[in-house]
Image: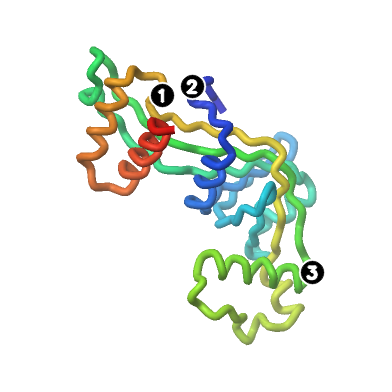
Amino acid sequence: MYLPDHFNIHDKEKINTLIQQNPFATVISQVNDSQPFISHLPLILEGDVLIGHMSRKNLHWQLFQKAPDCTVIFNGPHTYISPTWYKSGRDVPTWNYAVVHLHGTMELVEPFKEQLDILKKFSKVFDPQWPFHLPADLRGENELTSAIVSFRFQIKKIEAKFKLSQNRPVEDINGVMNGLAQRSDENSAGVLKLMSEFKNS
């Protein structure tokens, strides 16, 4: 990833927060010179490990066995930035965004009890009001493990890019924030929130 110093983020708390608030990840595997295989999956962060599961019909899990090195991408808020918001002089449009790339290795989790534990964690994180239970056709060990494959992703390298106008003069940053404040969409609000946090940190 192209990562200029002024957009390169090392703050683990900010990185973890982006992951937790945007858990729908892009998982990328590549074996030798073959075309990359990509899956889009919700993942949960536990320390330096991500946990998740997929349908056994999704053959991506077989690539985890052949080539456990993977890249996982989490996209945070992103939005168009109008040059009319700048105060320091002539400029061009751009795009502000926050993204995290994680590089590491995949390990399959196949025992029934461990897969069940992962499913319970997902339920607790994403729907704590729902009393977790498996449907009747998945309650047996063979039925569940033949339907899904779970995994752990050990994080080995983190690249975090928060492009939030840090390379601009203060008057431009304030102009961008004022412009974003006039919008009502969720992405603009998310970028504004991140910019406010950086400005006040």
Q: In this view, does 75 lie to the left or right of 87?
A: right
The residue at which mark 3 appears reads as: 111
Q: What element carries label 3?
A: loop
Tag 1: amino acid = Gln
- The residue that appears at 60% across and 81% down in the rendered structure is 133
- The residue that appears at 29% across and 19% down in the rendered structure is 92
Q: Is residue 32 above or below residue 22?
A: above
Sequence-first disc among 2 and 3: 2
Tag 3: amino acid = Pro
- The residue that appears at 47% across and 32% down in the rendered structure is 162
Q: CB atoms at circles 1 and 2 under 8 Å apart? A: yes
Mark-to-mark CA distance, 2 and 3: 45 Å
The residue at which mark 2 appears reads as: 6
In what quadrant of the picture does the N terminus appear? top right
Please state the horizontal and vertical placement of residue 135, each as a whole percent of the image: 60, 83
Mark-to-mark CA distance, 1 and 2: 6 Å
Which label number is shown at residue 166? Answer: 1
Residue 82 image-quadrant placement: top left
Q: Is residue 41 left or right of residue 76?
A: right
